[in-house]
């Protein structure tokens, strides 16, 4: 209001702000790198780990979402560093957490002062200003009537929304307890402060807490009700003004011209890394949405404990002065769990280490502990706009009874074998380089060494080991992904294309010839109305070259597991049910969110799958395979919990699948 907005605009800003996102520093999935997307879609819990001690985060939010919003709203007065020179003189209060004293904020960068003044403990991280660590001013002075009087106010209207002291029955939330503690030292001083107030208004808001944002409209009505009883006094005061004070509507800034980017010297991260995360360079005209995206990308890395910025005016354009403090926490312990019908149950334990060997690097090791041991190792050096490189290694294994195309391929169509119990083990190592193209596409290439072992204990077979070979290959890929949610997307699209050429093999089965695999996958999601979403997806794959081993063929069937190699989900058929060296598949899902984070959905998919499928027109004929599924899904902190009943008109029975937790 002091910056120039009128009451109607403030009401509009309040009603359009998503406070769940604000409190949680929500980072849209589309803002994250592919590496960070995976991190957010695998682990249920992330804990800082220092000197063999597991800690907890300092606050729920760094306040970055709030800071970006405040910076945009106050951009038109970004040049005003003395708050008495604002359209209406302004002051706010913060608390120095080290000394316990109040700090009067009447100069500086307005958005930063507002953030510090409202940094409620445990909700928002403290804010460093002028060498002081600041938190919510309400802890020391929640009603700064003296400071307003010192600014020269002739008549003070005070609105007091503080709580009185609560009894034990009303102290069942952490925020209420913290508020009670802060009120202990300020409530006695209120008697004198009320005497200094010319018009004192006390709305009845005792039943609300500092995070009752979902009841914002109710709170506003309470304020209106309390104010209406003083209409005569307010009208008399208005009559005494020499000229009526009318505020016109301000236009909210939508872009800035960034002529200079100032970044502090960092110990563990290069300027190129920071610029690469921002996604824009000096000399760019960017929207505030672009600025928010860049800041969110920096936040998503978890490499910085403090992220802030100032927009300083230049003769032409503006300077973006970025404030970064490196996170002293370099090690994290992350946990997850999952169950599906293929890998069965497992607990995921992850150790992530930043700055292991080089600047900008991250090392991550996953251990899947359960029915079958699995692991995933990833080392990555992120060089922003420049080429980045990494090494990854994984081991996956499962045991499954199969009665399908895949089993017949393994046993060369022996008629007396209908069902196999197979042990499948995959050990894959990759070295790769990748870069960002046009700020949107991830392009990469690398080499791979894979060891694949497929065996059985079925006694009727002459040999119990089908493959026990090493495979050396080269690969390349292109990725784009703007889905807002991996499991229940409401908007966005993705495209993934990759090719892989298998050059050498130890050739256990004596069936290997050099060959290549090309595959592509695309999907699109669109919200329909308030609660419904339509997702459409299509993918295809083909093997090129001489006939070779079938062990790397495309395998369709099942749902809810983390796909590796050329395994694909397919409704209507059991896990590992359809296999061939070429396939094309399309599907659609209609999802309806009946309650918040509760989904019911219907899915259909169709496919043609056969060896050498694309050498004729068979791939565009009526689909050979089809399947349907009804499902229910719940979004939880552990990941999606889903149950699906799936069937196919080509089969006599259906399948019920359960999937619990993030896929890994």
Image (cartoon, rainbow, N blue to C red):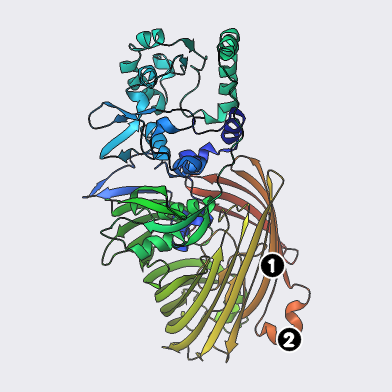
> In the rendered image of this protein, does residue 164 appear above or below residue 514?
above
Is residue 17 left or right of 572 when viewed as pictured? Answer: left
Task: Place residue 572 in its image quadrant.
Answer: bottom right
> In the rendered image of this protein, does residue 649 appear above or below residue 466?
above
* Sequence-earlier tag: 2 or 1: 1
Name the element at disc 2.
Answer: loop
Q: Percent x, y for residue 359?
A: 29, 64
The residue positioned 32% from the left and 52% from the top of the image is 332
Label disc, if present, on residue 494 of the rendered structure: none
Q: Percent x, y for residue 307?
A: 37, 48
Q: Which residue is mark 2?
A: 616
Q: Which residue is mark 1?
A: 586
| Residue at mark 2 to residue at mark 1: CA–CA distance | 19 Å
Q: Percent x, y for residue 133?
A: 28, 37
Query: Residue placed farthest to the front in the image?
Result: 242
> In the rendered image of this protein, does residue 270 appear above or below residue 9?
below
Name the element at disc 1.
Answer: strand
The residue positioned 59% from the left and 87% from the top of the image is 544
Q: Percent x, y for residue 115?
A: 40, 37
The residue positioned 52% from the left and 14% from the top of the image is 204
Task: Place residue 272 in its image quadrant.
Answer: bottom left
């Amino acid at each position: 209001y002091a910056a120039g907005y009128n009451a109607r605009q403030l009401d509009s800003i309040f009603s359009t702000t998503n406070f769940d996102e604000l409190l949680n520093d929500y980072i849209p999935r589309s803002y994250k790198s592919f590496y960070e997307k995976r991190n957010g879609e695998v682990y249920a819990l992330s804990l800082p780990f220092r000197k063999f001690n597991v800690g907890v985060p300092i606050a729920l939010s760094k306040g970055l979402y709030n800071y970006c919003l405040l910076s945009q709203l106050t951009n038109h007065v970004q040049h005003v560093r003395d708050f008495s020179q604002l359209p209406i003189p302004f002051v706010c209060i913060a608390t120095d957490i080290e000394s316990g004293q109040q700090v009067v904020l009447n100069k500086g960068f307005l958005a930063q002062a507002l953030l510090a003044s409202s940094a409620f403990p445990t909700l928002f991280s403290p804010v460093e200003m002028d060498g002081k660590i600041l938190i919510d001013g309400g802890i020391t002075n929640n009603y700064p009537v003296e400071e307003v009087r010192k600014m020269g106010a002739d008549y003070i209207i005070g609105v007091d929304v503080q709580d009185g002291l609560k009894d034990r029955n009303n102290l069942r939330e952490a925020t209420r307890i913290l508020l009670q503690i802060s009120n202990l030292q300020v409530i006695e001083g209120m008697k004198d402060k009320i005497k200094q107030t010319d018009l004192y208004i006390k709305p009845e808001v005792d039943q609300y807490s500092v995070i009752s944002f979902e009841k914002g409209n109710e709170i506003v009505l309470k304020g209106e009700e309390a104010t209406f009883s003083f209409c005569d006094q307010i009208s008399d005061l208005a009559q005494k003004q020499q000229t009526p004070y009318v505020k016109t509507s301000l236009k909210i800034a939508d872009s800035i011209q960034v002529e200079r980017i100032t970044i502090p010297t960092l110990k563990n991260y290069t300027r190129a890394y920071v610029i690469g995360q921002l996604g824009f360079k000096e000399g760019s005209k960017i929207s505030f949405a672009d600025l928010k995206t860049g800041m969110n990308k920096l936040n998503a890395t978890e490499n910085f404990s403090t992220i802030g910025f100032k927009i300083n005016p230049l003769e032409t354009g503006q300077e973006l002065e970025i404030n970064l403090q490196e996170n002293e926490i370099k090690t994290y312990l992350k946990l997850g769990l999952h169950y599906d019908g293929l890998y069965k149950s497992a607990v995921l334990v992850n150790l992530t280490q930043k700055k292991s060997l080089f600047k900008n690097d991250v090392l991550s090791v996953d251990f899947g502990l359960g029915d079958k041991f699995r692991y995933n190792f990833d080392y990555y050096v992120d060089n922003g706009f420049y080429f980045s490189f990494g090494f990854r290694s994984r081991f996956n294994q499962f045991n499954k009874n199969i009665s399908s195309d895949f089993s017949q391929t393994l046993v060369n169509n022996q008629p007396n074998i209908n069902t196999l119990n197979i042990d499948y083990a995959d050990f894959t190592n990759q070295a790769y380089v990748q870069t960002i193209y046009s700020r949107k596409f991830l392009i990469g290439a690398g080499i791979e060494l894979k060891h694949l072992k497929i065996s059985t204990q079925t006694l009727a077979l002459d040999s119990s080991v089908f493959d026990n070979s090493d495979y050396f290959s080269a690969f390349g890929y292109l990725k784009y992904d703007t889905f807002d949610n991996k499991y229940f997307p409401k908007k966005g699209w993705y495209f993934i294309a990759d090719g892989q050429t298998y050059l050498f093999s130890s050739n256990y089965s004596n069936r290997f010839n050099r060959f290549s695999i090309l595959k592509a996958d695309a999907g699109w999601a669109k919200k329909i109305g308030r609660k419904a979403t339509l997702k459409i997806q299509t993918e295809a794959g083909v093997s090129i070259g001489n006939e070779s081993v079938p062990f790397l063929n495309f395998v369709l069937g099942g749902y809810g597991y983390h796909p590796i190699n050329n395994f694909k989900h397919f409704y209507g058929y059991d896990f590992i049910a359809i296999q061939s060296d070429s396939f094309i598949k399309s599907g659609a899902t209609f999802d309806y969110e009946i309650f918040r984070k509760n989904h019911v959905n219907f899915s259909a998919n169709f496919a043609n799958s056969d060896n050498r499928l694309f050498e004729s027109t068979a791939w565009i004929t009526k689909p050979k395979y089809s399947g349907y599924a009804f499902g229910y899904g719940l979004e939880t902190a552990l990941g999606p919990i889903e149950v699906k009943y799936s069937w196919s008109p080509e089969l006599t029975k259906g399948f019920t699948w359960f999937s619990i937790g993030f896929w890994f």
